[in-house]
Every structure is written in C-alpha cells, then in structure tokens.
Image: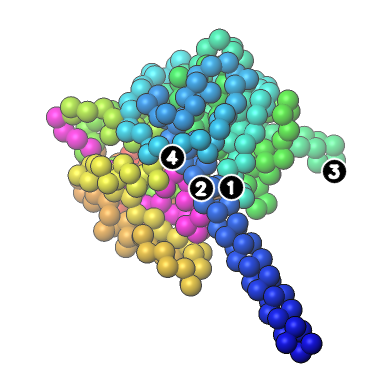
Amino acid sequence: VTFLMSLYRNYKTSVRVVSLLSQRHFHNRHQWLQQQQVNRILASNYSTTFSVSQSSFTSTPKSSIMTDIFSSLTSPPAPKSTLVPPGKCQFTAEFTSCKLLEKKSVSETSSVLRFELPDTSKALNLSTCACILARLELKKESEELEQVIRPYTPISTNELIGSFDLLVKHYPNSKMSGHMYEMNVNDTLDFKHIDFNVKIQAPFKPCTRIGMIVGGTGITPMIQALHAILGSGGEETPIKVDMLYGSRTSDDILGKELLDKWAKENKDLFSVTHVLSNEPEESKWDEGERGFITKELIESSFGPPSEGEKVKIFVCGPPPMYDVFCGPRTETDLTGVLKDIGYDASQVYKF
C-alpha cells in the first residue's frame, strides 16, 4: 500500500510539472505567433512581391486583412519604391466619416484596423511619409463636445483599392487609441488630410544622411521612407539611414524582422539600433541597447549638425518622444535634445 501511495504521489507531481511546462510553451508560442503576425502584415502591405495572400490586400474593400495570417514563413520582401505626389489623396481638409470594415489583433496591445474609403473604386493615394488625421468627438459632463485629433500613417500601400489599414497601439490613458481599440465592425471614425501633414518627399535630395528617432507605431512612416530610399536603386549619391528605434520590450518591437533583414542586406545604406526601456533583467536579449535613446547615442549614430542640408532627422512616436527630442509635432520651433546637440529646425522633420 505504501508503495502504491508513493507511485500515486509521483504521478500527480509529474502531471503538475507537465501541465506547467505546457502552459509556458503555449504562452511562448503565442507571443511568437503574435510577433510573426505583425511582421507579416507590415511586410505584405508594403510590397506586391510578398507571397502571403497578396490578393487580400488588392481586391475589394471587404476582403480579409489576412486570409491566413500564419500560412507562410516567407522572408520579408525587398524594399520597393512606389511614389505618389502630394495632392492626390482621397481625403480633403474636411473630415469624412469612414466605416470600420475589419479589425485584427496582432499583439496584446496592438491591432490592425481596415477602414472603407469614401470612393471604394480608388486607392487612398497618400504621398510618401504623409499622414492622415483621425477625429474622435467625446461628450463632456457639460454636454459639450471634446474633439480628440491624432495623426496616423497607414501601413497599406496605394495598391490597396477602396480601403486603408492602420496599425494602432493602445497606449494607457490615450482617448483616441483606447476608442479605436474598442471599435466594432461598422462603427465609424472621421478622417481628413491637410497640407501640413505632407512632410519631406522622396528622393530627399540634397540630403546624404538621415537619422530616424522612432517609437512604437511611429515606425510606419519610416518604413515608407525606407522603401523610397532603399528601393529606388541606381542613385548616384545614395542616402545613408541610421535608425534609433525605442520600444519597451523585445516583444513590443513592431516590424523587427523586416527592419533587420533590410539592415543586413543594405549594410552600407541602413542601420537600426533597437533600444529597450523595460526589457526584463533576466532576459538574454542582446540585439541592441537597454535604457533610453540618449543624447550621446544620437551624436554617435547620426550625421553632425555642421553638415547642414546634407543631414536630416526624422522623428515619429508618441507625444512624450516629441517633447524630449524636438518639441511638439504641431510646433515649427525646435526644442529638446536635438536643439541641444546643435541641429537646426530646417534639419528636423516631425512626422
């Protein structure tokens, strides 16, 4: 009897261990699949050469965001330059209501939202690195309407007809991202496009060096710029791009596979340094820097201010990032770390 009881206790212990290991494996597998999902969406939206259900991005507005998000492990595509000049965007300076067609969760805090365009027979036709403005109207206790307006750069290209895709990260206490995160299919949101949101256009001449300071979903206009720069080919005076990409943890890096591949294949033209502010101490991650993007890191990575119009700095991320490095994106004056280093307002572009 004692022997049988001992066997039973050992059996229960083994079952608990196997259960815990299975749960841990499932959690790690789930995180990996989420990151692959983000990489596939970013990659496939920016090139017709990607092989994952490309028709789902170029057919009718009601087509699925991804017909089978895990159907392929194809590597990200080569950069491709597809330029549309300013002034062609479907959205005007007046807000237009757009219906949410589909929403796809790609991580614990990020989703891709597909909205219907006013003219479903045409593409969005947004120019390089430009953005659109989303408006949310909230009722205050006084019954007055509060307008919340935020900029977004679509992750879809101008090859998508009748709709556009936004990658939205849910930031704590953010009214806009919180609302978009909770939207249901057929809910509507207002969008517009103004001249102010048309930034520097490719081919970015006479610039020869571009530094990018990026945070979170601020990566989307930078990927657009990289497509224009790395995908142009045959440039007599190529542009060297150095990116400092800030994220909380390694799991939060959006588009990492795409960026790392481009950096590896274009070593003379593009480098990316990942900077993690909240990576667990016990983590073995060693693919970049820990902490925050600092003045010293910028000075050692980017072209010096003294090179004038040959050097440009692109900044895109959450509002606190602008406050630290260059001042609010709605203000033309340059403040913060970049001014302290010596850059001029004409060298810095706030996306």
Q: Are marks 4 and 2 in contact (CB under 8 Å)?
A: no
Dot 1 falls on a residue whose secondary structure is loop
Q: Which residue is nearer to you in this view: 70 or 297?
A: 70
Residue 111, magenta (yes or no): no
Image point 37% across, 64% down: which residue?
286
Dot 3 falls on a residue whose secondary structure is loop
Q: Which mark is residue 160?
A: none
Question: Which quadrant: the C terminus?
Answer: top left
Residue 142: % across, % down: 85, 41
Residue 175: % across, % down: 68, 44
Q: Are marks 1 and 2 in contact (CB under 8 Å)?
A: yes
Question: Which quadrant: the N terminus?
Answer: bottom right
Q: CA distance from mark 2 to mark 3?
A: 40 Å
Of circles 1 and 4, the one toward us is 4
Q: Earlier in the sequence, mark 4 or mark 2?
A: 2
Of circles 4 and 2, the one toward us is 4
Give the magenta range: 236-256
Of circles 3 and 1, the one toward us is 1
Q: Are marks 3 and 4 in contact (CB under 8 Å)?
A: no
Quickly name the residue at label 2: 35
Q: Which kind of residue does numbered mark 2 sit on?
A: Gln
Quickly name the residue at label 4: 73
Q: Which mark is residue 107?
A: 1
Q: Which kind of residue does numbered mark 4 sit on?
A: Leu
Q: Earlier in the sequence, mark 3 or mark 4?
A: 4
Quickly name the residue at label 3: 141
* Crowdedness near tag 2: few (<14), some (14–19) or many (≥20) residues, C-alpha within 10 Å: many
